[in-house]
């Protein structure tokens, strides 16, 4: 009986300790998410300006450029996966990984070879556990992405894209990341980065506005050469920032429900412990009464 | 050429953005920047343009005659409908 009580007390203790941790993590994420969101917003003007410029070149020139023209046959595709460094964020990482699996099987069914760039320790672990090759891996800092990392990633992207398929290059690049919709909703998003699909609906120049004939300096080709790496960089950076904001939101939510769960456990176990204590007392009383009864000489 | 001394609404809407934030935005009468081809000055009514910037200063003249100078590296300049956008990976105001 007393043993039972002790077991319940132990469980309450452990639930309380867990709750302290999850509670702290929840609060940390909640405070970081504001900052992450602000960073997404701050990178907006740059992304918009770059996108606008790229769509201008692509729409108002008919230059053939490797980055915009669709190759006749796509042999290899590259998938860039943005996951997180740490777990305890609900389905955050598994969502993107699942989405990238879908994408992979789709690409394979189209007869394309698939290579991967992996960002975030969780995704790297997923790959190494399954003994799958990732062409390149970046870990660390997924919750506070630095522009330098985005630049590094996009440089390698452009480099591998410019290589011939026979030399290990790719003809197509997709990115998979969690898009931050709001605090409660983050959706895994798959976007084809290259060849350019100019330009995903949202960023298209305003409805009735007609973009005029552009002049390019120095040459259309040169402008594209300079512009496209910048465009890719801004897309990658934006994906990383969105992913970071989503990570914080997902972690906050996961940790909140963990704390709530711990609360429920504590309540349930407290009831059980009270019950056990009461029945222990009841038993002791009845033992005493029984003993006393046995000692009283029969009348 | 457009009337650049005009008071009232600024003839050009200028914004200078770098990768992680908007450095400066507002009205201006004139923008001078250095492209890979050489210096270029932009006044109201400039034809749509997309140019690669050489490393250097971008000078913006405000309607009240004041000047703002920004340092822009590895960027480009786009002009359309009197909206001038200077986009650089790293940009900052010098004065």
Image (cartoon, grey):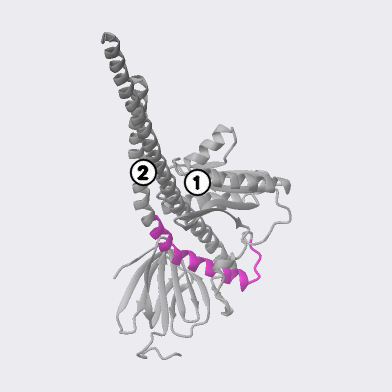
| Mark 1 or mark 2, earlier in chain | 2
Query: For the C terminus of chain A, which image quadrant?
Result: top left
In the rendered image, residue A53 lying in the magenta stretch gets the answer: yes
A124 left or right of A262 in image? right
Q: Is residue B54 depicted above or below A185 in this figure?
A: below
A206 left or right of B15 in image? right
Q: Is residue B66 depicted above or below A87 in this figure?
A: below
To which residue does mark 2 refer? Answer: A25
Task: State the residue at coordinates (59%, 37%).
Answer: A133
Determine the secondary structure under disc 2. Answer: helix
Magenta stretch in the rendered image:
A36-65
To which residue does mark 1 refer? Answer: A92
| CA gap, disc 1 and disc 2 | 16 Å
A135 left or right of A165 in image? left
Q: Position of residue B28 (x, y in %)?
A: 37, 81
Task: State the residue at coordinates (37%, 49%).
Answer: A29
Task: Tell me the quarter of the picture where residue A55 sits.
Answer: bottom right
Q: Position of residue A266 (x, y in %)?
A: 36, 36
In the rendered image, residue A56 lying in the magenta stretch gets the answer: yes
Q: Nearer the viewer, residue A293 or A208?
A: A293
Q: Chain of mark 1?
A: A
Q: Nearer the viewer, residue A208 or B18?
A: A208
Q: Nearer the viewer, residue A162 or A109?
A: A109
Task: State the residue at coordinates (40%, 78%).
Answer: B31
Q: Position of residue A260 (x, y in %)?
A: 40, 43
Determine the secondary structure under disc 1. Answer: helix
Query: For the N terminus of chain A, which image quadrant?
Result: top left
Q: Chain of mark 2?
A: A
């Amino acid at each position: 009986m007393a043993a039972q009580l002790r077991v319940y007390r132990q469980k309450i203790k452990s639930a309380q300790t867990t709750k302290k941790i999850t509670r702290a993590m929840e609060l940390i994420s909640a405070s970081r998410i504001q900052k992450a969101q602000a960073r997404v917003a701050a990178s907006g003007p740059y992304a918009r300006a770059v996108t606008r410029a790229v769509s201008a070149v692509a729409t108002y020139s008919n230059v053939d450029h490797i980055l915009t023209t669709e190759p006749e046959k796509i042999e290899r595709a590259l998938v860039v996966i943005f996951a997180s460094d740490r777990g305890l964020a609900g389905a955050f990482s598994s969502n993107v990984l699942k989405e990238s699996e879908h994408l992979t099987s789709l690409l394979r069914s189209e007869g394309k070879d698939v290579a991967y760039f992996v960002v975030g320790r969780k995704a790297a672990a997923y790959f190494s556990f399954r003994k799958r090759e990732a062409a390149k891996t970046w870990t660390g800092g997924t919750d506070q992405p630095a522009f330098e990392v985005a630049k590094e990633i996009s440089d390698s992207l452009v480099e591998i894209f410019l290589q011939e398929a026979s030399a290990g290059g790719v003809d197509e690049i997709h990115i998979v990341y969690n898009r931050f919709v709001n605090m409660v909703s983050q959706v895994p998003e798959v976007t084809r980065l290259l060849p350019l699909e100019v330009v995903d609906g949202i960023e298209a120049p305003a409805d009735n506005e007609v973009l005029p004939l552009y002049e390019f300096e120095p040459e259309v080709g040169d402008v594209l050469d300079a512009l496209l790496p910048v465009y890719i960089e801004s897309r990658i950076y934006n994906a990383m920032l969105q992913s970071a904001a989503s990570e914080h939101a997902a972690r906050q939510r996961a940790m909140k429900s963990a704390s709530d769960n711990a609360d429920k456990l504590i309540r349930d176990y407290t009831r059980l412990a009270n019950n056990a204590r009461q029945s222990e007392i009841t038993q002791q009383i009845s033992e005493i009464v029984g003993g006393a009864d046995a000692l009283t000489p029969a009348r | 050429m457009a009337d650049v001394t005009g008071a009232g609404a600024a003839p050009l809407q200028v914004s200078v953005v770098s990768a992680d934030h908007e450095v400066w935005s507002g009205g201006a009468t004139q923008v001078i920047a250095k492209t890979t081809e050489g210096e270029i000055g932009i006044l109201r009514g400039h034809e749509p343009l997309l140019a690669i910037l050489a490393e250097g200063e971008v000078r913006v003249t405000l309607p009240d005659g004041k000047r703002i100078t920004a340092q822009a590296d590895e960027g480009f300049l786009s002009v359309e409908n009197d909206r001038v956008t200077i986009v650089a990976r790293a940009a900052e105001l010098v004065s």
